[in-house]
Image (tube, rainbow, N blue to C red):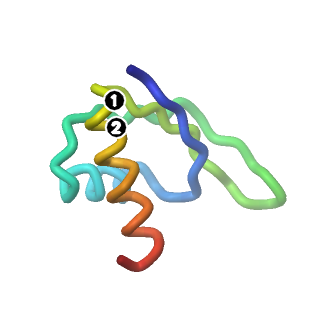
Amino acid sequence: MKREILTPIPLDELEGIREGSGAVVTLTLLGKVERNGIPLNIVQIEGEAGEIERFMERLRMARAGG
């Protein structure tokens, strides 16, 4: 399964979140766009659906300060 996200978070920080989550996913930087003056990374997340959800939950917690 593949999922794409737009995020201002650098890929190296996303890799750290992935490692911390224990999720078995692959992160690939597909490109960059700018929206309202904010540079965003287009990142593809590839893995099993449950693993992607595990990573996304850890990402939400990390960005919310949890």
Q: Quadrant of the N terminus?
A: top left
Q: Is residue 40 left or right of residue 64?
A: right
**Near-viewer residue (46 or 40):** 46
As drawn, the residue found furthest toward the left would be: 22
From the image, tell me which residue sits under label 2. Answer: 52
In contact (CB < 8 Å): disc 1 and disc 2: yes
Q: Residue at x 36, y 36 (%)?
A: 27
**Vertical placement of 44 versus 59: above or below?**
above
Q: Label 2 crowding class (10 Å Cα cut-off): few <14, some 14-19, many 20+?
A: many
Secondary structure beneath dot 2 equals helix
Task: Point out residue 40 in the picture as x, y percentages from the top left corner.
Answer: 64, 50
Q: Quadrant of the C terminus?
A: bottom left
Task: Point out residue 17 in the picture as x, y percentages from the top left corner.
Answer: 29, 57
Question: Which of the numbered marks, if any, corresponds to residue 49?
Answer: 1
Dividing the picture into quarters, in which one does residue 53 lie?
top left
**Near-viewer residue (6 or 37):** 6
